[in-house]
Amino acid sequence: MKTGNAISMSLIIVILLLGCLSPKQKMFTNPVLSGFYPDPSICKVGDDFYMVNSTFEYFPGVPVHHSKDLVHWKLIGYCLDRESQLPLKQMRASGGIYAPTIRYHDGLFYMITTNVNGGGNFYVTAENPAGPWSDPVWIDPEGIDPSLLFDDDGTVYYTRHVGGGDGYIGQCILNLETGQLEGEMKKIWSGTGGPWAEGPHLYKIDSTYYLMISENGTSYGHMVTVARSASPWGPFESNPDNPVLTHKDLDDNPIRAVGHADIVHTKDGWWMVCLAIRPQGGHFHHMGRETYLVPLEFDDNGWPVVNNNEPIEFSMPAPRLK
């Protein structure tokens, strides 16, 4: 065999081997949870992901889904499956359970939420996310959309919406031993000026505190905005590129009302779950608000960038997870 032919054959073998080692990335289909799965919240324990959603006036409340790859989800139980956990007598339409958050800390899962017109804000705990979950620990009757951050020093921050359409994000400390709040509710951010600054989640990433919220209500103007601070109490600096996710100006897009998000770090980087609708025949959405999945990364300035600043699509590259 001539030397040139031998080199060419070697190159072909190398290319083929590289192709085997780097298969084409698979695609997945949005929404990952279709039909009445609004306000998603997600947490990761080991290689397992768990997600919860709002259920409003319906029983049982707050489904728990499990996944290994963020795409395929299996219903494993409900956080609220007893009347002692979920009093719904004479509950109005669209009352009940709003915006649950799921977190894991020191061997326990925590699900915190609001029972609107049914007692206010509370949390339940479980060693196994499939259940059983504890009876409620009632925290306070005001506001909606509570969330928890378990800080490295043991402090637990309780963050929620305060007020109505012109409200803001407030925060205080939760004492897990007593189930009581400590100190006054402090205003930490009002958002970027849109009404209904709600659905807050506070994260600590590389010693920086990021506060992610939704604004403009849950209709077609819905959007996700982010601020950050060196302290969990602020002052919070607004991302100059806010909103980080919205379809509010995409009138012809088949996916609308995008917002109310939560993020999770994986072996394949950061990912975000959020809600959105699929309008049909005008401003109608038969399937309700559904759960979508999008990638997220941090730019050179430390700000989150969702899906490379592109709109969410029905078909997208899947996470590289088993």
Image (tube, grey):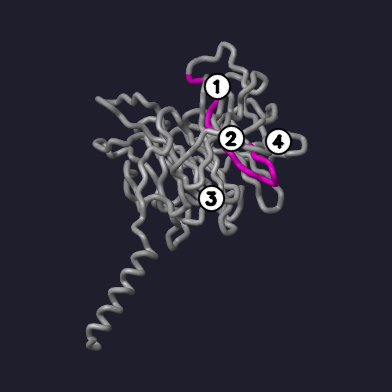
Quadrant of the rendering where the N terminus is positioned:
bottom left
Nearer the observer, disc 1 or disc 4? Answer: 1
Q: Are discs 1 and 4 less than 8 Å apart at CB?
A: no
- The answer to whether residue 103 is magenta is yes
Q: How many labels were placed on the picture? A: 4
Viewer-side residue, 319 vs 165: 319
Left or right of 57: which side holds 157? right
* Residue occupied by mark 3: 210
Nearer the observer, disc 4 or disc 2? Answer: 2
Which residues are drawn in magenta? 94-110
Residue 185 is situated, as x and y percent measured from the top left of the image, at 64, 37
* Residue occupied by mark 1: 96
Q: Residues within 10 Å of mark 2 (few under 14, many from 20)?
A: many
Q: Residue visible at 58% across and 31% down?
A: 77
- The answer to whether residue 48 is magenta is no
* Residue occupied by mark 4: 181
Amino acid type of the residue that numbered disc 3 sits on in the rendered structure: Tyr
Label placed on residue 146: 2
- Relative vertical location of residue 72 with respect to residue 11 in this rendering, above or below: above
Assign a secondary structure to mark 3. Answer: strand
Q: Are discs 3 and 4 less than 8 Å apart at CB?
A: no
Residue 252 is situated, as x and y percent measured from the top left of the image, at 24, 36
Main SS class of the magenta portion in the image: strand
Nearer the observer, disc 1 or disc 2? Answer: 1
Q: Residues within 10 Å of mark 3 (few under 14, many from 20)?
A: many
- Relative vertical location of residue 138 with respect to residue 126 in this rendering, above or below: above
